[in-house]
Amino acid sequence: MRRDNQTSVSEFLLLGLPIWPGHQGMFFTLFLGMYLTTVLGNLLIILLFRLDSRLHTPMYFFLSHLAFSDISLSSVTVPKMFIDMHTGQQSIPYVGCISQLYFFLLFVGLDNFLLAVMAYDRYVAICHPLHYTTIMREGLCALLVAASWIISCGSALLHTLLLVRLSFCADNVITHFFCDLTVLLKLSCSDISLNELVIFTEGGMLSFLPLAIVLGSYFRIGTIILKAPSTKRLLKAISTCGSHLSVVSLYYGAFAGVYFFSSSWDSKDIIASVMYMVVTPMLNPFIYSLRNRDIKQALEMFVNRVNLFKW
């Protein structure tokens, strides 16, 4: 049963969602529909970006990466939840749990940084419109996305490596539907002071930095609008920033629900987690497609191409 000298646990038990057995089928169907909508909707965003040259701009370049990150974030946890609900076998191997944790942290961090990069892009578009193409050149956009990936991978790897050095003894029951870092630390029978220190310092800093960029960008946008208020300028700002601001509000609202306004194990925590990993990635394509004229036009052209191909 020993995997190595540091742990005597070969698997963990995920308690899953607190759903009555008689309601399992209904919730399975509901979450399956939401997950498929997430995957198909975000894949459509990526496909439209690839096919329509009018979308080859910095904003849609960042949006395509956000769509990929949203698909990946949902796919890290939700399919395992489906298997547990369908089979009733709620165990997950030690290696599988650690892998799930790593990719979960990776794509959570990537989402965070991509939203910050998109906020900076909106700031440049509103506050420096004449220099937008010069500032947001292709090389800088690629560098910002690459930096987001590298920082997210490094942070996730750091927390994962610090976790695998810990020992896990008799208690292997995870009171959640995925391998959450805070829950795993509570199960450890080793000293977790270093883990908590890194979470508080490095994790807090990497969480605060993107949020500070988002808030700073929109503060500057608001300042520019208020300096010379006009209906035309306000409408332009809403059309330019409305979709991203909606996504940011949804993202950080769900984040706050998980980590600030919920206890470790109750229905409120589960609802917030589902919002964060299922609902938010599902709604992002709808927010951008319903509020964005370019996406609508690209979608109409794509549908016309498909219909023409059928004929």
Image: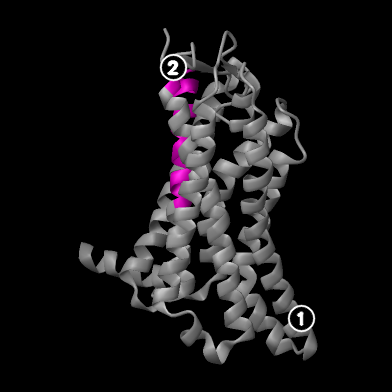
Q: Which residue is mark 2?
A: 87
Q: 41 or 109, which lies in front? A: 109
Q: 36 or 177, which lies in front? A: 177
Q: Quadrant of residue 118?
A: bottom right
Residue type pointed to by label 1 = Thr
Element assignment for label 2: helix
Prevalent SS, magenta region? helix
Please tell me which residue is depicted at 38% across the width and 60% down the height of the picture.
Answer: 46
The image's colour scheme reads one colour
Percent of width and height locating residue 157: 47, 40
Please tell me which residue is depicted at 59% across the width and 63% down the height of the picture.
Answer: 116
Q: Is residue 238 positioned above or below 197 on the image?
A: below
Q: Which residue is mark 1?
A: 223
Q: 41 or 151, which lies in front? A: 151
Q: Quadrant of residue 170?
A: top right
Please tell me which residue is depicted at 71% across the width and 77% down the height of the picture.
Answer: 220
Q: Where is the N terminus found, in terms of image quarters? A: top left
Residue 195 placement, left or right of 53: right
Q: Where is the C terminus found, in terms of image quarters? A: bottom left
Q: Is residue 74 magenta?
A: yes
Q: Is residue 96 positioned above or below 298 on the image?
A: above
Residue type pointed to by label 2 = Thr
Residue 297 placement, left or right of 127: left
Q: Is residue 296 visible?
A: no
Where are the magenta residues, as a range? 69-94
* Res. 136 mark: none
Element assignment for label 1: helix
Q: Is residue 18 magenta?
A: no
Percent of width and height locating residue 205: 66, 52
Q: Is residue 307 visible?
A: yes
Percent of width and height locating residue 289: 51, 65
